[in-house]
Image (cartoon, grey):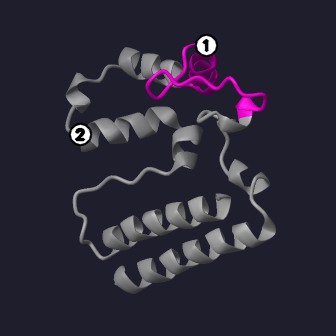
Amino acid sequence: LLEEYIEFSVNKIEKIFHDIVKRELKDILLIRYESLLSDPRYSMLLISQYLQINHLITEEIIQETIKANSFANMRHKEETVGIYGGLHHNEENRVLNYKVREGKSGVYKKYLSHEQLNYVQNKYMNFETAKNLYSA
C-alpha cells in the first residue's frame, strides 16, 4: 500500500513538474518547502506579489499569518480540534497519521526504505534532467 501511494504521488508530482518545465502550465509560482521554513516572511511577500495583493499586506498581517501557521500552532490545532474537515486521529499511533508531522525538511527519508528512497530520488533526477533539457 505504501509503495502504491509513493508511486502515485511521485508520478503525479513528476507530471506537474514536467508540464511546468515544458511551459505547458504558465503563470505559476513555485516555492520550495525549505524556503517556507527558512524564510516565511520572504515567502509570504513573494506569494502576495504573485497574487497582486502586496499592497494589502502589512507587516502585522505577515507576522500574524506566520504565527498562526507555525508548526506549533498547526500541531496544536490538529491535536485538539483536528484539521481537514475536523478529522481526529484516535488511533494508538496517531502521531504517524498526523498531517502536521515535524515541521522539518526531509523527514520523509526516515519513513521510507532504501528501495523507496532510490525510487523517489531517481524520479527527482528524471525531473532535473528534463528541466535542463527544456530550460535552454
Q: Is residue 58 above or below residue 121?
A: above
Q: Decide whether residue 86 is among the magenta residues.
A: yes
- Image x and y of residue 81, in percent: 55, 14
Please name the residue that numbered disc 2 is placed on: 51
Who is closer to the viewer here, 70 or 88?
A: 88
Label ID, residue 20: none
Q: Decide whether residue 69 is among the magenta residues.
A: no
Residue at 27% x, 40% y: name it: 49
Q: What stretch is highlighted in magenta?
A: 70-95
- Image x and y of residue 79, in percent: 64, 19
Residue at 59% x, 36% y: name it: 99
- The residue tagged with tag 2: helix, strand or loop? loop
Residue at 21% x, 27% y: name it: 55
Please name the residue that numbered disc 1 is placed on: 80
Who is closer to the viewer here, 29 or 60?
A: 29
Among numbered discs 2 and 1, the one appearing first in the sequence? 2
Around disc 1, counting alpha carbons within 10 Å, would you say few (fewer than 14), some (14 to 19), or many (20 or more)? few
Quadrant of the drawing holding the C terminus: bottom left
Nearest to viewer (mark 2 / mark 1): 1
90 relative to 31 in the view: left or right? right
Quadrant of the drawing holding the N terminus: bottom right
